[in-house]
Amino acid sequence: MKISAIACAMAFAAPAFAEDAPNANTVIATVNGADITLGHLILVRSTLPEQYDQLPAEVLYSGILDQLIQQELLSQDEKAVETLRVRLAVDNERRAAIASGVVDLVASEAVTDEALQAAYDAQYASAAMGTEYNASHILVETEEEAQAIVDELKAGADFAETAKAKSTGPSGPNGGELGWFGPGMMVEPFQAAVETLKPGEVSGPVQTQFGWHVIILNETRVQEAPSLDSVRAELANGVQQEAVKTYLDNLTGAANITRVTEDQIDTALIGNIQLLEE
């Protein structure tokens, strides 16, 4: 009988939301009759900087709730005044939040498999992908050194071994290999020199800001288009931006908009904070 009585008392004392799963409307505090809900707290939590992610949830819960309670107390205080500045700030926040929701909806609806495939085809299917180059080089300080190396190579010296022995660049120990690169990835005139060579051909001395280079073009290949999956995020971003732009253009075209132009108002007034004082 004693245990049953305690259990009954606990059931009546439990919060109302204990029987149902908490939601955004669940009241987590009241201040002189004004409700603070779980949704209020979640919204504040979502705006915190990343460093707050390291804090335990119970610490954040307590801290944010304390802040909301204090804000509610101050907003109810006899000294509190809903000024013009406050009303305008609320207007701006409401407008921005609603607009952001529309943008998110339009953007998410735009990303379909068909839209991504069309964007991929437009960007990659018929585009000329260009040529990629595989080259090696030997880097030295002077033109004389570079020319001497060119002469050695013409006489039959092995390029990779010569690079290991004489190149001052970081690729020297690897035989001067630079791997594959596309147009514009190397500094000029290095890139220009590579693009004039045929596979197996060695350049004359080429000067860049790093020194003097002797270059051999190992081979070339036509760049392959990336797979759709590898560029899905990039394509989705482009599809979303275009969809939002088109949606806004259509809204603007259908709307009745009037505006005061810059020649009709002193634009310097946007810095006059005193105009917000009643």
Image: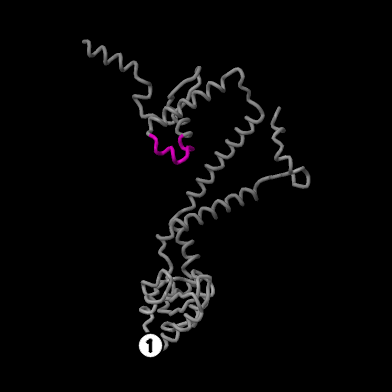
Q: Quadrant of the N terminus?
A: top left
- Label 1, secondary structure: give it: loop
Q: Residue furthest top?
A: 1
Q: Name the magenta segment's main secondary structure.
A: helix
Vertical relation: 22 (above or below) 241: above
| Amino acid on which the number 1 mark rests in the picture | Gly
The residue pinned by badge 1 equals: 156
Residue beneath the point at 26% across and 16% down: 7
The colour scheme is: one colour
Q: Quadrant of the C terminus?
A: top right
- Percent coordinates x, y for residue 60 in the rendering: 42, 31
- Percent coordinates x, y for residue 38 in the rendering: 44, 29
Vertical relation: 155 (above or below) 38: below
Q: Is residue 73 left or right of residue 172?
A: right
Residue beneath the point at 45% across and 33% down: 42
Mark 1 crowd level (few <14, some 14–19, many ≥20, 10 Å Cα): few
- Identify the magenta region: 45-55
Q: In the image shown, does 251 or 268 lie closer to the viewer?
A: 268
Vertical relation: 11 (above or below) 220: above
Q: Is residue 209 magenta?
A: no
Q: Is residue 51 magenta?
A: yes
- Report if residue 179 is visible in the image: no
Q: In the image shown, does 216 or 122 lie closer to the viewer?
A: 216
- Percent coordinates x, y for residue 179 in the rendering: 40, 71
- Report if residue 239 is visible in the image: yes
How many labels sit on residues? 1
Q: In the image shown, does 266 or 7 lie closer to the viewer?
A: 266
Residue beneath the point at 45% across and 35% down: 45
Residue beneath the point at 50% across and 45% down: 105
Q: Is residue 78 left or right of residue 269?
A: left
